Amino acid sequence: SNSLEDIYAELAGLGILVRTQQEGATEGGGQELEQVLERYEKLLASLEDIRKYNNEEGSGIVVESHHILPHLLHHITKNCRGLWQLYEAVATFLGVASVALTLIILTYFFAVGGMTIRLVGGATGAAGCLGFLLGLILGTCVHELGHAVVLANNGIQIRRIGAAAGSFIGGFIEADEAAFWRVNPEVRLRFNAASIGTNTLVGVILAIVAALAYSEPLLFVAAGVLFFGITNSLPVRPLDGGWVYEDLVTRYASNPKAMRLLLKVRYAALVAWLVLFIRSTLV
């Protein structure tokens, strides 16, 4: 059986092969394309097996909607389509930027050995903790909203939306996998990036409103929303930042060897952070 990582890497490789054939038709291309499609269908079947296994093995409390919320989101995005497409574009840009910014922030953090952030008035205690917790909950909701809007905007069926507390805590959204993997790779990039970008967008808006209103509780809410987005921006799977990084690599790296190298080199950041942290603690 294939792991999710193996399936994704092979799907990316198949995408590069199809793109190469489209850019310059070669002899025997039709036969190769049939083999690609056959392997593609097998990979989709493997993805479905993994999904079913996870559903069966999952434990804890799960609250989900199979009809009401998915239909509502599809209905909402049909209205003011231009506005929703603009939102999708802005959220995608912010999501990609957030991945890069997170790498810079964490590199700085490990280089100096710490970071001091002073909120207005230095509020702490129960009010701050409650505001931050509410921010995390709101961050989860808007994060999944970002995923859902991209699916609805591009006509991909949303099978279910929900939240779980058990083997993992958080929200989830499940799309029609066959349709999802058949769309243009750019749509998958927007799907993965828009969620992070939505956290950044909502967090920044809340922070501006909090600063203008001199509201410390709201500032903690904004911090919670932004924190949720930052933790999901790390370029490692299963975090969305990992999928965004891989989407960018598979889109712009035309050589399979270069693609594999770029997919592995990101883990060098973990080694660099460890070295920087040790250096900063010894100085």
Image (spheres, rainbow, N blue to C red):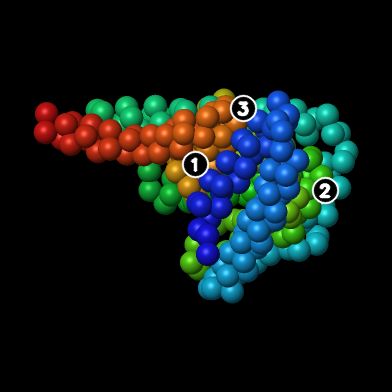
The residue sitting at 56% across, 67% down in the picture is 54
The residue sitting at 82% across, 52% down in the picture is 72
* Residue type, mark 1 in image: Gly
Residue where numbered disc 3 is placed: 93
The residue sitting at 56% across, 52% down in the picture is 7
State which tag comes first along the sequence, 1 or 2. 2
Element class at badge 3? helix
Residue 91 x/y as whole percent: 64, 32
Give the spatial CA distance, label 1 vs label 2.
27 Å
Choose between 184 and 192: the one closer to the eye.
184
Q: Is residue 52 left or right of residue 65?
A: left
Residue 122 appears anywhere in the view: no
The answer to whether marks 2 and 3 mark residues whose Cβ atoms lie closer than 8 Å is no
- Above or below: residue 164 compared with residue 214: below
Q: How many numbered discs? A: 3
Choose between 46 and 189: the one closer to the eye.
46
* Residue type, mark 3 in image: Phe
How crowded is the residue under tag 2: few (<14 C-alpha within 10 Å), some, or many (20+)? many
Quarter occupied by the C terminus = top left
Task: Please tell me the numbered disc located at residue 74.
Answer: 2
Q: Is residue 55 left or right of residue 151?
A: left
Give the spatial CA distance, label 3 vs label 1.
16 Å
